[in-house]
């Protein structure tokens, strides 16, 4: 081995992804998740305090990437019914999709969404559903998520102290085909039967 090869820095290890059921997370896991989510969603950091690693409804399943003990990416998933127009539809809600600020722009987000796809298959509902801001819709669309046009979503948002308020959101709704095609998505606005993830 050449002298240069002996002194070359070792390539950084890739993050390790794990898909874990909510009930299998430890207190340390929740604290590590909350710390990363607070760094990533800094305007909502008051939600992610101590071991509180969720802002709306707790996920059923989480996709988590770590470098050692440090969480660097996360997505939460939960099966739930929503009403679309007149149809009650079981979907897998996806939320708290986050890549730690220090790891953004490295391709980690694309791998996170590939892992989310596998988790959607595992949960077995016909569609994934999420709401996001206009600035990041391209990220999801490149990964196969499809926008819902002219659709308003209605849900109850809770404050950190528990007060609820009805929110109507006119844009940012995306679906992921899992066991059905977009042509099978019912017509009409979305009403969440519970909080969003």
Image: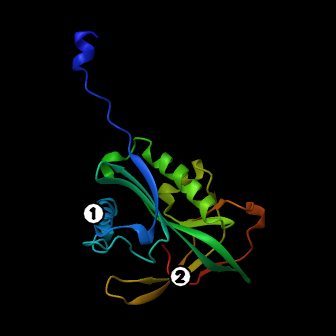
* Distance from Cα at disc 2 to Cα at disc 1: 26 Å
Of 181 and 51, nearer the camera is 51
Q: Quadrant of the N terminus?
A: top left
Residue 57 on image: x %, y %: 46, 77
Residue at x 37%, y 47% (from the top left corner) = 104
Q: Is residue 173 above or below residue 13?
A: below
Task: Report if residue 99 is visible in the image.
Answer: no
Q: Which mark is residue 35?
A: 1
Of 197 and 24, nearer the camera is 24
First in residue order: circle 2 vs circle 1: 1
Residue at x 62%, y 51% (from the top left corner) = 144
Residue 20 on image: x %, y %: 46, 62
Of the two numbered discs 2 and 1 in the rendering, the one whose residue sits closer to the viewer: 1
> Which element type, helix, strand or loop, lies under badge 2?
strand
| Residue 159 figure quarter | bottom left
Q: Residue furthest front?
A: 24
Q: How is the image coloured?
A: rainbow
Q: Which mark is residue 155?
A: 2
């Amino acid at each position: 081995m050449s002298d240069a090869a002996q002194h070359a820095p070792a390539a950084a290890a890739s993050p390790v992804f794990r898909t874990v059921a909510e009930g299998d997370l430890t207190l340390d896991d929740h604290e590590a998740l909350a710390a990363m989510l607070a760094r990533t969603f800094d305007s909502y950091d008051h939600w992610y305090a101590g071991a509180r690693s969720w802002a709306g409804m707790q996920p059923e399943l989480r996709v988590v990437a770590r470098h050692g003990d440090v969480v660097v990416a996360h997505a939460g998933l939960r099966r739930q019914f929503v009403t679309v127009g007149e149809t009650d539809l079981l979907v897998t809600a996806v939320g708290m999709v986050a890549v730690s600020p220090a790891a953004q722009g490295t391709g980690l987000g694309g791998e996170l969404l590939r892992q989310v796809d596998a988790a959607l298959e595992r949960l077995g509902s016909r569609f994934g559903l999420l709401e996001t801001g206009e600035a990041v819709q391209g990220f999801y669309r490149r990964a196969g998520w499809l926008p819902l046009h002219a659709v308003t979503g209605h849900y109850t948002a809770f404050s950190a102290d528990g007060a609820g308020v009805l929110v109507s959101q006119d844009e940012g709704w995306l679906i992921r085909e899992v066991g059905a095609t977009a042509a099978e998505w019912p017509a009409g606005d979305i009403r969440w039967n519970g909080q969003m993830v």
